[in-house]
Image: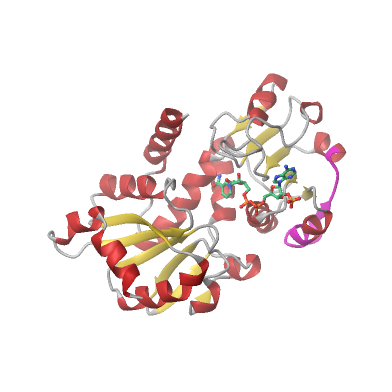
Amino acid sequence: MQQYKSAWRESSVVADTLDVGSPSLALVIGQPIEHSLSPMIYNTAFAIDNLNWKYSALEVSKEQAQDFINDIREDKYVRGVSVTMPLKEAVIPYLDQLTEAANELKAVNCIYWEEETLTGHNTDGDGFINSLIADTGEGIPGSVFAVVGAGGAARSVIRSLRQASAEKIIVINRNHEKAEFAAELGGENAEVGTLDSVTNCKYVINATSIGMAGTDNEGMLPLAARYLTSSQTVIDLVYNPIETPLLLEARKKGATAISGIGMLVHQAALQYQLWTGNNAPIEKIQKEVINIISKNN
Ligand code: NAP
């Protein structure tokens, strides 16, 4: 148990701040964690807001999840935790309560204190909706969405599209059973479809990992360009590279192309708001994220 405390207490970012009063800490946990963009995102926001907070990345395995949660209950400095793979489900049994989103999705990406109650939440879906509205200026009600993919990201997006009153959600996935399961989160306006249905959808969302840098699927398209039209808005949840093969094809067709960076930043902004009570400086963070990803590619 002690090992986690020393891990964050000894990290340079924390040691730098211990002399200057009592900083609040936030952490991202997962495995692997070294490539996480979260420390950059949140530390940028804390600096802009002039808050005495620090954010660090900590490698925690599934087997260590319970000890980690026990530790943060005892550590008054840790005020927020971002949770990533493979812990989104693994932390659930050790929390005091879940929000409706986390409960429906059976996945937690954010832990915060609601007074004395350690609460698990999921900001991915609402981060997606907020970014879509910010990027397009358009509303969700009355619109038809194709969601390609049925994993964790797809499920959170489908759930929030239901809540935002999307007119229709068509879920398309390689594994049909997973598509059925994900479509249930979309309620009565969601159904499982095939790629042929994409052409008639105003919004096309890639929620698969196809096209992601550093994977076997790098450089690949989640769906053929022939399914896209100029009147569509195509959103790729993959944010590295910034210009994915899908977004390049969408632009060639004359469609509006939107990167997953917006969702990444907006879901983080919702966590930031829960922990600090402040609105995150979204535009400045987004600029930093784009700079860093561009430099690394
Ligand atoms: P996940 O739970 O592992 O789901 C992966 C999805 O991709 C599944 O639907 C899977 O289909 C599909 N897939 C993977 N390889 C495939 C292939 N070769 N052919 C066809 N389908 C394939 O992952 P996730 O957490 O949902 O994440 C999906 C992507 O979204 C990742 O790239 C992640 O980085 C991104 N993401 C972005 C944000 C953001 O803030 N922008 C947030 C969360 C996730 P099967 O079910 O058939 O296996």
The quadrant of the picture occupied by the N terminus is bottom left
Asked where in the image residue 287 lies, by quadrant, the reply is top left
The residue lying furthest to the left in this view is 19
Q: Position of residue 122 (x, y in %)?
A: 54, 62
Q: Position of residue 240 (x, y in %)?
A: 54, 36
Q: Is residue 241 above or below residue 156?
A: above
Between residues 158 and 140, which one lies in front from this camera angle? 158
Q: Is residue 189 magenta?
A: yes
Q: Is residue 151 above or below residue 238?
A: below
Asked where in the image residue 99 lies, by quadrant, the reply is bottom right
Total marks placed: 0
Residue in the image at 33% along x and 55% along y: 56
Q: Position of residue 205 (x, y in %)?
A: 69, 41
The segment highlighted magenta reads 181-195
Residue in the image at 72% along x and 31% along y: 232
Q: Position of residue 156 (x, y in %)?
A: 63, 56
Q: Is residue 15 above or below residue 199?
A: below
Is any atom of residue 197 visible in this view? yes
Q: Is residue 20 left or right of residue 214?
A: left
Is any atom of residue 144 visible in this view? no
- The figure's colour scheme reads secondary structure
Residue in the image at 52% along x and 41% along y: 262
Q: Is residue 59 left or right of residue 175?
A: left
Q: Is residue 291 magenta?
A: no
Residue in the image at 38% along x and 80% along y: 116
